[in-house]
């Protein structure tokens, strides 16, 4: 989990001014170079251009292209790592997933380039400690910082006189207003499971708090606890009331995003990458779409932000580790960080990126992050990978049969307990 010092550090360093761009130290890179990533179609063109530019700067390098579909990547990279035939460098999600492959000795630390290029001055210490450091060593360079919020169709809200909710009661009232107008309040595309986690995460964070959630993620609390049952009960109330666009498991996140953009639904709970998607459709941030933070449920629960951090790492079995490490240094260039952020719809982790470069929506989101006392990684990055798969399956199962949530939680707890016991 990223604690309050991360949140304070992010805003403080972003407004403090620009840092010095680190210089590449490898001038004689040679041979084949493989860089794999999961950004797929949306966002993929930006990272592809970044990789190609890096290779063009080193005449001795020959790039072996290896982009992989986002969902396919989750399995294919593990197969490559297990077979000792991985790409030299690849994108990976900070948190439990990196920890697992570090523990499996599939990555090599990058302390040498970290020190040589003074990369510690390029990123907030909270990110360094919580997202880049594993078992006491630096293993990753961050490329993105995302935040999860409710993104909505501004025209629909205005047409029906709905103001962005700040409390749970206001959110339910807004959902009822849209239902009476024949418009589903919430779009959720859970075809690939992971979008459903944001509803569970935010409800648990707003009702039980980040400290309890961390206990649950670490196997020290139970999915049959009253806290978890309450979060699911509230989610079930929304589903049973008919506030979700039907058949959530039939479509993916971008299709849900389009339902909101097209006025078929009013809002969707999603990460900041949705902004890049909307802008690619020609929508204007703050005019055609906007956001609000997930509403407060219990006033006495400290608020927490939620989101993932994308990083690049170096394979332990990299055929060209020098090129891989030089590429990671390349990614810290603030111009590159900003280019990817603006193109893919995220925040740049680099302290050297001027916050004035963002649109007004993203600038306000920076304020949300700074105001919240906690920042948590989303479910599938916060718990044991095997447990994450159990949970992701359960979110999809819930959307198919929300009334069985208590039975679902009993099955999740039984399976999760076995995985935590096996990992000890």
Image (cartoon, grey):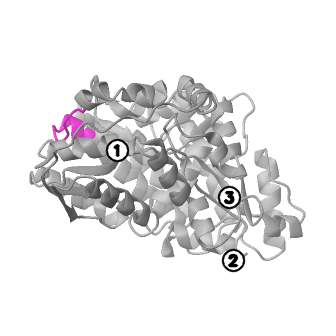
Q: Position of residue 57 (x, y in %)?
A: 28, 53
Residue that numbered label 2 is attached to: 262
Q: Which residue is mark 3?
A: 151
SS at mark 2?
A: loop
In-image side of 271 versus 81 (left or right): right
* 243 in relation to 144, above or below: below
Please tell me how many numbered marks the rendered image carries.
3
Residue 415 in view, yes or no: no
Residue 104 painted magenta = yes
Mark 1 is surrounded, within 10 Å at the Cα level, by few (under 14), some (14 to 19) or many (20 or more) other residues, namely many
Q: Earlier in the sequence, mark 2 or mark 1?
A: 2
* Proximity of marks 2 and 1: CB atoms separated by less than 8 Å: no
Which of these two is toward me, 410 or 420? 420
Q: Residue at x 51, y 74 (%)?
A: 251
> Can residue 69 be seen at all in this image of the molecule?
yes
User: Could you tell whether 72 is left or right of 261 in the image?
Assistant: left
> Label 1: which residue?
330
Q: Earlier in the sequence, mark 1 or mark 3?
A: 3
Q: Point out the stretch of residues depicted in magenta.
A: 100-110
How crowded is the residue under tag 2: few (<14 C-alpha within 10 Å), some, or many (20+)? few
What secondary structure is marked by label 3?
strand
């Amino acid at each position: 989990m990223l604690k309050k010092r991360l949140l304070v550090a992010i805003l403080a360093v972003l407004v403090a001014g620009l840092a010095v761009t680190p210089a590449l130290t490898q001038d004689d890179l040679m041979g084949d170079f493989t860089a794999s990533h999961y950004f797929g179609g949306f966002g993929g063109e930006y990272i592809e251009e970044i990789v190609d530019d890096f290779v063009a700067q080193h005449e001795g390098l020959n790039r072996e292209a290896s982009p992989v579909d986002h969902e396919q990547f989750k399995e294919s990279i593990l197969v490559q790592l297990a077979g000792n035939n991985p790409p030299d460098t690849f994108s990976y999600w900070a948190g439990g997933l990196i920890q697992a492959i570090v523990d499996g000795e599939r990555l090599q630390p990058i302390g040498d380039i970290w020190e040589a290029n003074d990369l510690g001055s390029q990123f907030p210490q909270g990110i360094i400690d919580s997202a880049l450091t594993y078992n006491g060593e630096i293993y990753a360079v961050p490329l993105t910082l995302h935040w999860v919020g409710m993104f909505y169709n501004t025209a629909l809200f205005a047409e029906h006189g709905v103001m962005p909710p700040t409390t749970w009661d206001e959110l339910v009232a807004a959902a009822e207003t849209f239902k009476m107008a024949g418009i589903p309040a919430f779009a959720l595309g859970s075809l690939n499971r992971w979008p459903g986690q944001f509803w569970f995460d935010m409800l648990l964070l707003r009702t039980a708090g980040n400290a309890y959630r961390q206990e649950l993620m670490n196997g020290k609390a139970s999915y049959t606890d009253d806290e978890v049952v309450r979060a699911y009960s509230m989610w079930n109330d929304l589903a049973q009331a008919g506030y979700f666009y039907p058949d959530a498991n039939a479509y993916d996140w971008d299709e849900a995003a389009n339902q909101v953009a097209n006025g078929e639904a009013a809002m969707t709970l999603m990460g900041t990458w949705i902004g890049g998607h909307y802008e690619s459709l020609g929508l204007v941030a703050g005019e055609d779409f906007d956001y609000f933070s997930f509403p407060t449920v219990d006033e006495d629960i400290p608020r927490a932000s939620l989101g993932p951090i994308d990083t690049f790492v170096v394979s332990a079995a990299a055929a060209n580790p020098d090129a891989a490490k030089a590429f990671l240094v390349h990614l810290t260039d603030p111009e590159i960080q900003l280019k990817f952020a603006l193109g893919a719809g995220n925040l740049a982790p680099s302290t050297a990126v001027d916050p004035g470069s963002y649109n007004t929506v993203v600038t306000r989101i920076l304020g949300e992050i700074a105001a919240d006392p906690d920042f948590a990684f989303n479910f599938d990055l916060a718990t044991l990978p095997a447990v994450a798969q159990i949970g992701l399956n359960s979110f999809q199962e819930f959307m198919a049969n929300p009334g069985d949530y208590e039975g679902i939680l009993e099955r999740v707890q039984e399976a999760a307990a076995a995985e935590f016991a096996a990992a000890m």
